């Protein structure tokens, strides 16, 4: 079994004064050893909550109400918090979309890397940690690691801060890196550099990466397989080339058509009218129905199942059900 991470039935509810809203509904996905899995969807699709669930970091008032998250054959949802904290950093690295916020502005990079290395490589002494920090910075493409190590975060660019965050995420030699919108806060040239680095880490170290993004072009550029989320549910999944060459799900098709011209980034997603709505736990029908140009009667009353279409592609749409009367 080459599945490093295997999520099934994951369901996350947010309980607020206005009621219960279901952010993630019965999500299943797996990341194989050495692969890059792209998790794509609009904001509010549940992609970040899914990623944070793996790290045991779902923000309040969110709560995992069902499912399994099996990492290297252990169900994380049954481990005590102390065990999960140990896995975080050592076996599962994490980078966010705000590298500056992830770094402490008051400490030099050297000091922050030392704290991280103490936690995830306790076998190293001070000199060993300094060596390791230097080699991590070199691995992330810093030609002058000493100068970077001596700097404070505000003396470095956003792209440099993200490379440092990646270096720190790799400090414990994790098997899996979770990257949540890792380039969203960076300018376009730097985005490409960070993606190239992630690609190289995947190829050279066999690092498995779960990359979360609203940007289908980014996922297409880097991922081996794709999971498309909408309304907290997996709508389509499969090999990235196969899925994007001929999307089976209307939402994937709409996302693909809305991939902007790099010269007009503001056009992104403008083409799918409407916005994802919060979903109550007992909602019927297809979650995309209010925005779907192909919706027909059953879409409002029956939840489509995730159906194996072909070539390992699965999609959740009544149009793919041969037994369903199509419009
Ligand atoms: Fe559209 Fe119906 Fe398919 Fe949902 S099930 S994506 S509403 S056609
Ligand atoms: Mg997010």
Image (cartoon, rainbow, N blue to C red):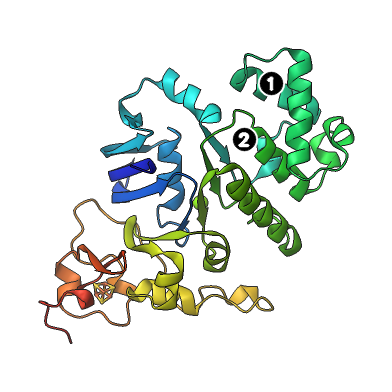
The residue that appears at 32% across and 77% down in the rendered structure is 292
Q: CA distance from mark 1 to mark 2?
A: 12 Å
**Residue 289 appears anywhere in the view:** yes
The residue that appears at 42% across and 35% down in the rendered structure is 60
Q: Residues within 10 Å of mark 2 (few under 14, many from 20)?
A: many
Q: Determine whether the residue tagged by mark 2 lies in a helix, strand or loop.
A: helix
Judged by depth in the image, the label closer to the viewer, 1 or 2, is 2
Residue receiving disc 1 = 115
In the rendered structure, the answer to whether residue 276 lies left or right of residue 98 reads: left
Q: Nearer the viewer, residue 223 or 109?
A: 223
Q: Nearer the viewer, residue 45 or 81?
A: 81
**Quadrant showing the N terminus:** top left
Placement of 117 over or under 57, stated as above or below: above
Residue receiving disc 2 = 169
Q: Residues within 10 Å of mark 1 (few under 14, many from 20)?
A: some
Across and down, in percent, residue 296 comes to: 20, 80
**Residue 58 appears anywhere in the view:** no
The residue that appears at 75% across and 50% down in the rendered structure is 159
- Mark 2 C-beta closer than 8 Å to ligand 2: no
**Quadrant showing the C terminus:** bottom left
Placement of 42 over or under 206, stated as above or below: below
Q: Determine whether the residue tagged by mark 1 lies in a helix, strand or loop.
A: helix
Q: Going from the N terminus, do you reach mark 1 or mark 2 first?
A: 1
Across and down, in percent, residue 134 comes to: 79, 30
């Amino acid at each position: 079994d080459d599945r490093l991470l295997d999520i099934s039935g994951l369901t996350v509810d947010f309980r607020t004064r206005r009621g219960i809203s279901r952010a993630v509904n019965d999500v299943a996905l797996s990341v194989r050893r050495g692969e890059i899995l792209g998790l794509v969807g609009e904001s509010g699709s549940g992609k970040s909550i899914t990623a944070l669930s793996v790290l045991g970091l779902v923000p309040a008032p969110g709560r995992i109400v069902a499912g399994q998250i099996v990492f290297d054959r252990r169900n994380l949802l049954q481990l005590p918090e102390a065990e999960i904290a140990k896995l975080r950093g050592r076996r599962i690295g994490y980078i966010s979309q705000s590298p500056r916020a992830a770094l402490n502005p008051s400490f030099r990079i050297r000091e922050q890397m030392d704290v991280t290395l103490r936690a995830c490589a306790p076998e190293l002494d001070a000199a060993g940690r300094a060596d390791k920090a230097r080699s991590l910075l070199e691995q992330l493409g810093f030609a002058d690691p000493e100068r970077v190590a001596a700097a404070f975060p505000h003396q470095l660019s956003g792209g440099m801060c993200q490379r440092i965050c990646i270096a720190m995420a790799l400090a414990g030699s994790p098997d899996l890196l979770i990257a949540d919108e890792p380039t969203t806060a960076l300018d376009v040239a730097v985005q490409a550099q960070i993606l190239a680095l992630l690609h190289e880490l995947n190829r050279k170290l066999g690092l498995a990466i779960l990359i979360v993004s609203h940007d289908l072009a980014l996922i297409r550029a880097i991922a081996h397989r794709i999971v498309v989320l909408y309304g907290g549910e997996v709508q389509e999944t499969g090999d990235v080339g196969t899925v994007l060459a001929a999307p089976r799900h209307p939402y994937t098709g709409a996302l693909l058509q809305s991939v902007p011209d790099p010269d007009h980034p503001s056009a992104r997603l403008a083409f799918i009218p409407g916005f994802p709505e919060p979903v109550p736990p007992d909602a019927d029908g297809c979650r995309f129905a209010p925005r779907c140009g192909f919706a027909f009667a059953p879409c409002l009353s029956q939840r489509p199942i995730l159906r194996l279409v072909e070539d390992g592609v699965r999609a959740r749409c009544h149009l793919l059900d041969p037994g369903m009367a199509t419009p």
